[in-house]
Image (cartoon, rainbow, N blue to C red):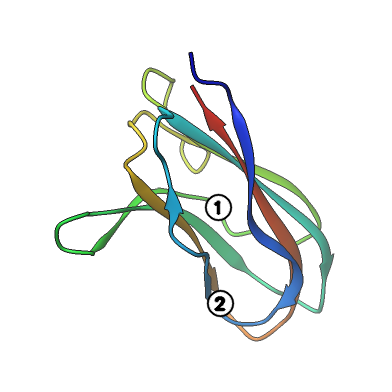
Amino acid sequence: MSKNQQVQVLPSAARTATTNSDDMRNARHKGVRVHINVTAADATPSVVFKIQGKDNLTGDYFDMLASAAVTATGDTYLRVSPGIAVTANQTANEQLPSWWRVVATHADADALTYEITADMLV
């Protein structure tokens, strides 16, 4: 039986522009719980985080879940997993595809310092 596994998606850094994580490989897990840990905010940043799946044949990305705009320090959790209740900007009832990533879309150039980790869920 598979076990939950934790992975680092993006290391802690101050970012001012849209950032894509590397493609993450999902070999055997049904879902993912993404933790965005914001430790500093400069001026008035606004960042929306998305979990995107990747189509293996075309290489195209598709949105699975988007957070509400993050504007201050604190923790945000996003979860994609089959069989869970859907909550806007927090959870999506979907199977995690073989390849996925996180995209942080910055609305302006104000810095937001964050790191992103993920728990791969069985």
Residue type indicated by callout 1 = Ala
Q: Quadrant of residue 94?
A: top left
Q: Residue, x 63% and y 69% (percent of image)?
A: 46
Among numbered discs 2 and 1, the one appearing first in the sequence = 1
C-alpha gap between disc 2 and disc 1: 12 Å
Q: Is residue 56 left or right of residue 37?
A: left
Q: Quadrant of residue 3?
A: top right
Q: Is residue 71 visible?
A: no
Q: Is residue 36 left or right of residue 106?
A: right
Q: Secondary structure at mark 2?
A: loop
Up-down relation of residue 81 to residue 44 (above or below): above
Can you give x and y, in whole percent of width and height, for residue 14 in the image? 76, 75
Q: Is residue 34 left or right of residue 20?
A: right
Q: Residue furthest top?
A: 1
Q: Which mark is residue 68?
A: 1
**Disc 2 target residue:** 107
Q: Residue, x 43% and y 21% (percent of image)?
A: 85
Q: Residue, x 66% and y 82% (percent of image)?
A: 16
Q: Is residue 117 left or right of residue 62?
A: right
Can you give x and y, in whole percent of width and height, for residue 111 in the image? 74, 79
Can you give x and y, in whole percent of width and height, for residue 11 in the image? 72, 63
Q: Is residue 37 visible?
A: yes
How crowded pointer 2 is (Cα within 10 Å; few <14, some 14-19, many 20+) is rated as: some
